[in-house]
Image (cartoon, rainbow, N blue to C red):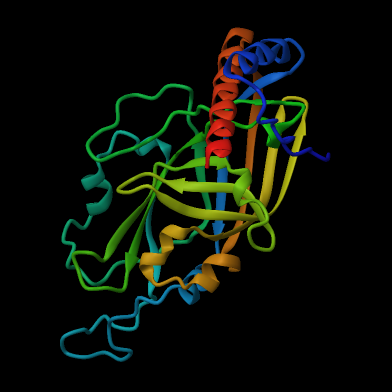
Amino acid sequence: MNIKKNPIVSPVFTISAAIVFSAILSTTTQAATVSGGALTLNLNRDAIIAGVETDNFPDAPTVDFPMCCRPSLYLEEFYDASAASKTFAQLREGNTPDLYDLESDEISAVGLQYAVNGSTITPNPGGRQNRATTFAFDSNDLLGTATGSIGLGGVTRWRVDVAPPSNRILLGDMTLEYDPTEEGRTSGRSGWIITNHIGFDAGAFELFDVTTLLVGDSLTINGNLGFGWGFDHLGATAARLSDARIGTFSFQTTVVPVPAAAWLFVSGVAGLFFSSRAKRVRHE
C-alpha cells in the first residue's frame, strides 16, 4: 500500500483560518492512534562492535587486565516492560552492583521486544523517563499527518570497553516517532526514529529501508536499523552513523479511532504551529 507524504502547507493561512480549516478537515479524516503490540529489535552484535571504537584495554591478557579482549560494546542485560518499576540505579547495577567488575556475560541481542505503552503510565521511579503513547494520525495519510510518539517499554544495559565506572550504559524508555525532515537525508533513511530517553535524550536508532503497511486496524512497520546520533560518544564515526546497518526491526500494533473532539484539538494545534512557522519564515 502506498502512503502519500504530507502536502506543503501554504504560509498565507492565519491562525484563525488554520483552526477553522482544521474543524472542517476533522469531519472528513479518519483520526486514529495505536494501542498494544510491540517493537522487536534484532541487533547484529558484530556490526555494532565494528561500528564503535572504545577499545581501551590490551588485546592480550595482562596482570592488571586478565579479562582483556572483550568486544568494544556488548549487550549485558535486557529488561522488558515488566521492569517499569525499577529505578535507574537498579537497572544499571543489576545483579552485580560492583561497577568495577570487568567480567560479565554477553547475552543475545536478537528478539528484544518492547511493548507499546498506553496513553497514560504510572509515575516514573527515580531516574526513569518512560513515556506514554501520544501518537495520532489520519489513517488516510499516515506519514503526512503523524504527530506525537509511541512510548515503548523496556531497557537494555550495555557493557562498554572503557574504564569504570563508565563501563555500563543504559538504553531504553524509548519512543518511536516519525520526522519527515529526516527522510532521505542519507540513502535509505525513512524518517522513522527510535529515541532514547533514559539518562539522556538522544537518537538510539535510525530506521532504514522501511516498509509501512496499514490495513484495516493493523499497522506494521519493518526495516533495517542504523546507529542513532547518540552513538557518537561511543566512537561511531560520521560515516557509520550515516548509513551503517546494524540489525533489523519489526513493529506491529493495532489502530484505534480517536474521538472527534480530540482529533479537532490536535488538528487545531497543528494549524497554530504551521501558521506561526510561516510567519517566522516571512520575517527571516
Q: Is residue 141 visible?
A: yes
Q: Kindly identify the residue that appears in the image at 43 percent across and 73 percent down.
A: 52
Quarter of the rendering containing residue 234: bottom left
In this rendering, would 20 be left or right of 100? right
**Quarter of the picture holding the N terminus:** top right
Q: In terms of depth relative to the viewer, which is nearer, 236 or 152?
A: 236
Q: In terms of depth relative to the viewer, which is nearer, 234 or 103?
A: 234
Q: Is residue 79 visible?
A: no
Where's residue 74, x and y in %?
A: 40, 67
Where's residue 11, x and y in %?
A: 65, 30
> How many marks on residues?
0
Quarter of the rendering containing residue 271: top right
Q: In terms of depth relative to the viewer, which is nearer, 112 or 12?
A: 12
Residue closest to the far front = 283
Q: Kindly identify the residue that appears in the image at 56 percent across and 31 percent down.
A: 279
Q: In terms of depth relative to the viewer, which is nearer, 120 or 105?
A: 120
Q: Kindly identify the residue that appears in the image at 60 percent across and 25 percent down.
A: 136
Where's residue 196, x and y in %?
A: 42, 47
Residue 107 vertical position relative to residue 268 in the rendered view, above or below: below
Residue 236 vertical position relative to residue 91 in the rendered view, above or below: below
Quarter of the rendering containing residue 110: bottom right
Where's residue 77, x and y in %?
A: 36, 55
In this rendering, would 279 be left or right of 195? right
Residue 53 vertical position relative to residue 171 in the rendered view, above or below: below
